[in-house]
Structure formats: structure tokens, C-alpha cells
Image (spheres, helix red, strand yellow):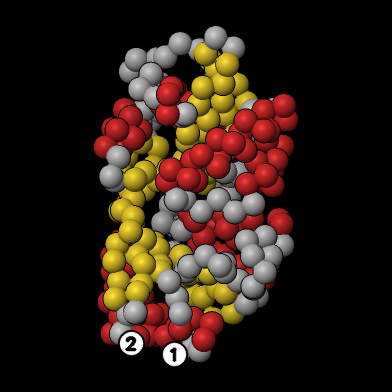
Amino acid sequence: MAWTLSTSLDDFRDRAGGFLAAHPAENTVLLTVVDRLAERGLNVFGERPPVFGWWRASEGGPVAGAFLRTPPYEPRLGLMPVPAAAELATELAAAGPEFSELAGVSGGADTVRSFAAAWSAATGAGHSVVENQRLYRLGELTGPPRPPAGRHRPAEPGDRDLVIRWYGEFRGETGVMLPNIPQAVDDRIAAGGLHLWEDDGHPVALAGNSPVTAGMSRIGPVYTPADLRGRGYASAVTAAASAHALAQGAAEVLLYTDLANPTSNSIYQQIGYRPVEDCLAVDFAR
């Protein structure tokens, strides 16, 4: 069993691209990050170069695991066998200062637990879970059981300032990493991937969908200002964004929820989303 590490995006796409595309749900974050790097350059997330890795059970065998890191953000584990996650942690712990001070890791729950245990054993760092998420896949899309007043429309350049503000509020409330918000908003608006729900002519909720890659699109962020919640706007705009992703050709439409928020988990299931896997984010501390 062996990991190969590289700073070459082209090598990662050549070696692991087929594996990522064959499992688009479990590798959804890796797929969208790779697309972003290819579109905007290797420094889109930060000044330090990304690091990529792929795993084979035997020399010359097919790729069966992958991860990436885009500093300053911590590694994201894609689909991989649980033992491969432990092997990766041990290898990164011995790889020098670039990795020796990792602050955390995220990905599928079982692989993150395996990585974290091996990292703690190799470095002496403690670890604690800081986020529990669930990945959902859209089955049959249905509208909200109690449709709210208003209508859906795509976000337009004139909505830019509002959307940037809502992105910032979403990041502040959730802690979700949203680098370079103005650029991300501009790109999403240009691609038609930002959706607003309007009530009485005023935007009241937001949902995004990522460009389709490997037949997959991921919904997010989904945001309703605090004083407008509880009226069904989030369900309606998420359903609209999901329908748009399907119309763009997505075979799989995905989204993440915070397991600490039972409301969001309930409303997404009501419009047709079904669980795929649980995911964790873990912090390390010495």
C-alpha cells in the first residue's frame, strides 16, 4: 500500500481524476476544489502551493484513495479505505514542517477518525471533533410541503453587494470556509449558480449551486437572514437551486448539513434529499 504526494495539479488530475469522477458524491469537495484551482490558478486559496495525494493498494494498481490540501486550509480526505487514512497520517507526520503542525482534518467520518487516531499516535497531539456534518444526495425533487409566498429568480450583478454581505454573515454564523468571497460571488453570478427567493419584491433567501463536474453539482451556501427564518424560504430557494442543477445536466445533486441543526436536516429531506454519509472536521492540539 502506498501514497504518492505531489504539488502538481496536472499530475493529480491525470492519476486520480478518473477515481474522483467515479465516486462524485464521496469526492465532491475534492472535485470542486480541483475545478477551482484549474480555473483560477494554484494560489486562489492562498499563497502556499496545494498538496495532492493518491493511494494505491499495490504498485501499479488502480487509484483507490485521494486527498488534497490547499493552505492555509487543512487537508480534505476524499474516499479511501480506512487503513489508508491511518497510513496517510503517519506519512504526513514524518514529512517535515510543512505538515508537522497540522491544525485539523476533515472528510468522511470513518476515515477522519482513523487519520486522527494515527496522527495523535505519531505526534502526541490530542484531537477533538469540531463539526459533524451529513452529506445528502437528491433523490426525487419535490417542492416544499408548504410553499412560501414569493418567487425564485437568479442573482444578478445588481445583487452583488447584498450577496457578498449574506456570504459574510453565513461564514460568521457557520464557520464554513469561504475564501475570497467577492470573487466567488462574481463567478457564481456569472455562471448562473446563485439563486434568490423574493417575497414582495425583496430578496429574502439565497442558495448556490456549484458548476456541474463529473456529473455532480453541490448546493451551498444556503442562507436566510435571522429575522426572516421559519417561513419556508430556505426550502423553496434550495429546491429552485436543485432544479437548476438538474437542468444543467447534474446526475447527482448534493448538499451538506450541520447535524447540530435538526431543522435543516428535516427540510432538505422533505424536498427529496437522502443521506449518503456522515462527515467530521477534527482539530488537533498539542
Q: Is residue 30 left or right of residue 80?
A: right
Residue highlighted by disc 1 = 94
- Mark 2 residue element: helix
Q: Is residue 118 visible in this depiction of the protein? A: no
Residue highlighted by disc 2 = 122
Q: Residue at x 34, y 45 (%)?
A: 258
Q: Position of residue 4 (x, y in %)?
A: 52, 82
Q: Residue at x 52, y 33 (%)?
A: 207
Taking 37 as reference, is 61 above or below it? Answer: below
Q: Residue at x 41, y 56 (%)?
A: 26
The kind of residue on which mark 1 rests is Ala
Q: Position of residue 81 (x, y in %)?
A: 34, 71
Q: Crowding near pointer 1: few (<14 within 10 Å), some, many (20+)? A: some
Q: Quadrant of the N terminus?
A: bottom left
Q: Position of residue 272 (x, y in %)?
A: 35, 31
Q: Crowding near pointer 2: few (<14 within 10 Å), some, many (20+)? A: some
Which comes before the other along the chain, label 2 or label 1? 1
Q: Is residue 159 left or right of residue 273?
A: right
Asked where in the image residue 109 lies, by quadrant, the reply is: bottom left
Q: Quadrant of the C terminus?
A: bottom left
59 or 78: which is nearer to us?
78
Q: Is residue 107 left or right of residue 178?
A: left
Q: Residue at x 44, y 50 (%)?
A: 175
The kind of residue on which mark 2 rests is Ala
Taking 81 as reference, is 259 above or below it? Answer: above
- Mark 1 residue element: loop
Pointers 2 and 1 in contact (C-beta within 8 Å):
yes
Q: Is residue 43 visible in this depiction of the protein? A: yes
89 or 229: which is nearer to us?
229
What is the distance, in whole Å, between disc 2 and disc 1 at their CAs? 8 Å
Taking 280 as reference, is 269 above or below it? Answer: above
Taking 69 as reference, is 260 above or below it? Answer: above
